[in-house]
Every structure is written in structure tokens, then in C-alpha cells.
Image: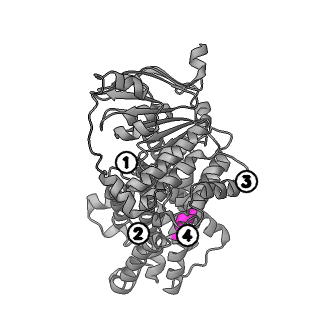
Amino acid sequence: MSKHFFADTGVLLGRSLRHIARSPDTIITTAIMPIAMMLMFVYVFGGAIKTGSDSYVNYLLPGILLITIASGIAYTAYRLFMDMKGGIFERFQSMPTARSAVLWAHVLTSLVANLISLVVVVLVALLMGFRSSAGVPAWLAVAGILVLFTLALTWIAVIPGLSAKTMEGASAFSYPLIFLPFLSSAFVPTDTMPGPVRVFAENQPVTSIVNAIRALFTEQPVGTDIWIALAWCVGILVVAYVLAMNTYRRRIS
Amino acid sequence: MTTQHSQAIHVRGLAKSYKELQVLRGVDFDVARGSIFALLGSNGAGKTTVVKILSTLLKADAGTARINGMDVATQAADVRESISLTGQFAAVDEILSGRENLVLVARLRHLRNPGKIADDLLERFSLTDAGARKVSTYSGGMRRRLDIAMSLIGDPPVIFLDEPTTGLDPQARIEVWQAVKELADQGTTVLLTTQYLDEAEQLADRIAILHEGRIIVDGTLAELKRMLPPAKVEYVEKQPTLEDVFLALVGTKA
């Protein structure tokens, strides 16, 4: 690690955050789709869905937060792709700058942008009647899980960001990630699902993460869900990080 | 060894293949300190590959390349301290202003007073008035000037310019040429690639032609001209070229 790693990452993070400040539409578009889904599910389908919880928005919010992150990281891939294509990535790599600082700056930017989007979505949920009696430690635990999930998906986003040939290619990978919460306990309880679907839903990462966040919000015991959720997040993070660094080394030798 | 060290760039036997395609098949050349060296070649001749290897962005399959005596493969970090790359496409940040771009690079090169460095360069490249504007509003020539200005930050002794005038209008081209000449006057070593013969003729102290992965000719303009049969003397009425007409009409010869 170069002696300038932290200083360089800081400078480049400042650059990306300035990009976001100058085009806040990326935050708005990230938040708007999950908000629209939340409105539709709460006010259109919600009445007909039996979740066993008295407020559907309370039931729904954890899944909506994960969808927010999944749509937000498409912009991480996009920003990285634009740097690769514009040649500015090569300029930075040919300078006496800590090389990995360029990637880390994008990763941290992704974290900041997603956290802002998440705050916007939670504020809208509060307006729609979301209430939680959870205390500060539970909120911190929720924030921790969301940060970990964002980092895991961000490192996935780095891979197409570095290797995509077109802009569409750089962001298309996020569609299945946005779709994944539908096949989980995010919108409806899994017990009404037919056999194979249910097996998939109950054993994919989103369900354990959603259940853990839901339990934290409602002050229920988190049980084993939180450990499974953390294991998924850390596992995805490690695998995605290794693959992303491999892609990076192949692109810039 | 002494000859090697007096050269700013020293390249021997450089080879590089992309899968089956052999792009470089043993490239040799030297660039003297403070001179302008033009690497001439058609599209796909491997000029950019040479520049990428020299600027530590790509590893060669075989051969050695040294910048100021330092090996690009084993002393990459040291090489990066003494080079600067201006790639084929203006590598500027569109969303930032011109001044912010310069400050960014000065910070990444860990220099003191990034603001002053930026202001001086804006002045030198006649961009002071545009300094606070977003780069996305710049013309092609302004963008290229900013790009070159960014490459000068930290006074790197060796500068690579990969097709610096491709896609520019004649006026912007002259502006870039002037900037390059000023650089060499101040002792900077410049390696530029181009597919325009007149550009090499205008700027370079030495010209090498890269063809099918090898340097087939390497010499001064006079030496290259001597390779052909002596010029015949003919009297032709000199018609203005379209470029002369264009520049006369547009009227601001730099």
C-alpha cells in the first residue's frame, strides 16, 4: 500500500462526491423506483396481502431498503465505466498516486450515495405511516447490516464497471439484484409459496437480511437470521472483492 | 551504460501480443533528453501500445524500456514520478470546472499550493476566463489544452502525447503545436505519436516510423528525406491550401 493511499482516496472521494452534488438526479432516480414500489404495494396490493403484521408499510420497508441499494449500485458501475471510457482512469493510473485509491474512492462514494438514498426512502416511509419502537442500538444494527450489504453489492458493481463494453452493459447486472427481493419474504410471507419457489426464497440472502432487519425494527428476537444475514453479506463481499480485484489487475497490469 | 543514461527514453526489443495478434515484434528506439520524438504510424500500428507500456499501464511480453534510467516494469512507481501521459482522448473530468481539474491533479501529485499551480496553468494556456466553467461546455481545442495543462503539473521531465491533435480543427491544432514546442524549449522530453506526417515534420527532432510491429525508419527529417532520390527542382505557382484559406478567413492565427 502506497504511503499516500489515504490522502489520495480522500482527494478522489471529494471528486466523486462533487459529481453527485452536481447531478443529484442520481440520488433521486435511485430513490424514486423503490418509493414508487412502496406506494403501489402499500396502497394498491397491501390491503389484500396477509402478513400477520398490522401495518403493511412496517412489513415492507426492509425489502424496499434492499431494493434501494440494488438500484443505487448501478450508478457505481456507471461512474466507474465513465472513468474507464473517458481515459481519466488511465491518467490517474499513470500518475504517482496510490493506484487502488481510484477504486476505493468509487466504493466509498457508492456508500455515501446509497446512505443518502436510504435516508430519503425511510423519510417517505415515515410519512406513509412507518413506525418503529426500536431504540438506538437496533437502528445502529440495521444501519450496520445495510452498510455491509451496500459494500457487498458495490464490489459486485465494480466488476461490470471495469469490464463492460457499453454503458447499458455496465448497469444491466443490477436488474436481477433488484428482482431478487420479490422471491423472498420482503413482500409476502414465504409460507404461501409453492415448494421449489419457497425453498429458493427461504434460502437466498435477501430473506435472512429482510427478516433480521424486520426483527430489529419490531424489537423481536433476531434469532439465527441475523447471523445468516451477516454470513451472506460478508461472504458476498469477500467473493465480489476478490473477483473485482482480479478484473482490475487484468485491466491495468 | 553512459549512453543509456543520457537518453530520456531507451527501448530495446519491446514485444507485445494480444492473444494471437502480434502488435509489437521487437521495437527499438532512443529519445534524447529535451528533444521531441515522433512515432509515426497508421491506425493500428501499435503506437498506443508503445505509449501504454512506457507509461506503466501495460506490461510488455518481452524487451526492456527505461525512462531516465528506470525500468518501467520493475521500477514502475519511480517511473510514474517522472512521466506524464496525455492519452488519445482528452482525459478530463467533464463535470468539474477547468480549475478544479487542475487542482485535482496537483493534489494527486502531492504538490503544495494546488490553487496557485492551477491559476498559473490556466493563464499559460489562455483558459483563465473559462477556468470556473464546467469542462463539458469547452470546445475540443480548449479541452485538449486543459488536458495538456493537466499533464504539465509537477513538471514531469518526460511527457507522452498520444495523437494529441486527432479530431481537432486546424486552429486548435496550431495551439497544441505551440504548446508542445514551448515544452521542448524548456527542456522537457516529448514523445508524441501521430498519423499526420505534417505534424511530425512540424514538431519532431527525430521521427520513427512504426510499421507491422517494428521501427522501420528512425532519423531526423533531413535524414529521412535523404532516403528518397534527390528532389527535382520544379517551378509551380503556389496556390493557397484550404488550410491557409480557412485560417485567413477565420482570422485568428493563434
Above/below status of A153 relative to A246: below
**Mark number, residue B113:** 3
Residues tagged by mark 3 and mark 2 found on one chain of the structure: no
Residue at the disc numbered 1: B166
Mark 1 and mark 4: span between their CA atoms? 33 Å
In the image, A89: left or right of A12? left
Mark 4 or mark 2, which is nearer to you? 4
Q: Chain of mark 4?
A: A
Residues tagged by mark 2 and mark 1 found on one chain of the structure: no
Q: Secondary structure at mark 3?
A: loop
Q: Residues within 10 Å of mark 3 (few under 14, many from 20)?
A: few
The stretch of residues the image draws in magenta is: A17-22
Residue B214 is situated, as x and y percent measured from the top left of the image, at 34, 23
- Amino acid marked by disc 3: Asn
Above/below status of A183 relative to A94: below
Q: Chain of mark 2?
A: A
- Residue A247: quadrant of the picture: top left
Residue A171 appears anywhere in the view: no
- Residue A206: quadrant of the picture: bottom left
Q: Quadrant of the N terminus of chain B?
A: top right
Q: Chain of mark 3?
A: B
Tell me which numbered mark, 4 or 2, is placed earlier along the sequence: 4
Residue at the disc numbered 2: A186
Q: Residues within 10 Å of mark 1 (few under 14, many from 20)?
A: few
Residue shown at the point (58%, 32%) measured from the top left: B34
Mark 1 or mark 4, which is nearer to you? 1
Mark 1 or mark 3, which is nearer to you? 1
- Callouts 1 and 4 close, C-beta under 8 Å: no
In the image, A7: left or right of B145? right
**Mark number, residue A21:** 4
Main secondary structure found in the magenta portion: helix
Mark 4 and mark 2: span between their CA atoms? 31 Å
